[in-house]
Image (spheres, rainbow, N blue to C red):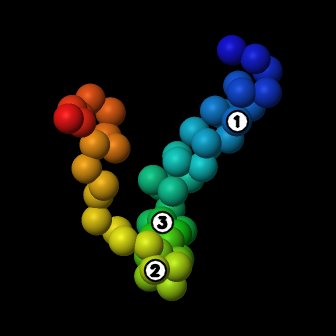
Amino acid sequence: MSKKSGIIVTAIGAGVTYLMRNKQAREKLFTTVSGFMKSSGTSSSPSYGSKKGSRVN
C-alpha cells in the first residue's frame, strides 16, 4: 500500500470511529446526507446489481 492510500485509510477509519462514539455528530451527518439526497432528487432506493456479489443477467 502506498503512503498516500495509507493516510486516506487511516483518515476514514478515524472518521468512522469518531462517528461511532459521538451520537450527536452521527445524527447530524445522517440528517445532512438525507437532506442532500432529497434536494438532489436522487432516489434512495438501492439500484439492483450494484452490490458486490450480486448477479446481473
- The kind of secondary structure element at disc 2 is loop
- Callout 2, which amino acid? Gly
Label whose residue precedes the other's in the sequence (3 or 1): 1
Q: On the image, which quarter does residue 43 sit in?
A: bottom left
> Neighbour class for label 1 at 10 Å: few (<14), some, many (≥20)?
few
Give how far apart the Cα atoms at labels 2 and 3 are. Answer: 23 Å
Q: Nearer the viewer, residue 4 or 53?
A: 53
Identity of the amino acid at label 1?
A: Ile
Is label 2 or label 3 in front?
2
Element type at mark 1: helix
Q: Earlier in the sequence, mark 1 or mark 2?
A: 1
Q: Are marks 2 and 3 in contact (CB under 8 Å)?
A: no
Please give left or right for residue 38 compared with residue 45 in the image: right
Q: Give the x, y percent position of residue 33.
A: 50, 71
Q: Which residue is mark 3?
A: 26
Residue 40 visible to an observer of this rendering: yes
Q: Residue furthest right?
A: 3
Labelled disc at residue 8: 1
**Mark 3 secondary-structure assignment:** helix
- Residue at coordinates 25% horizontally, 50% vertically from top-left? 48
Q: Real-space Cα distance between discs 3 and 1? A: 20 Å
Give the label on residue 41, or none.
2
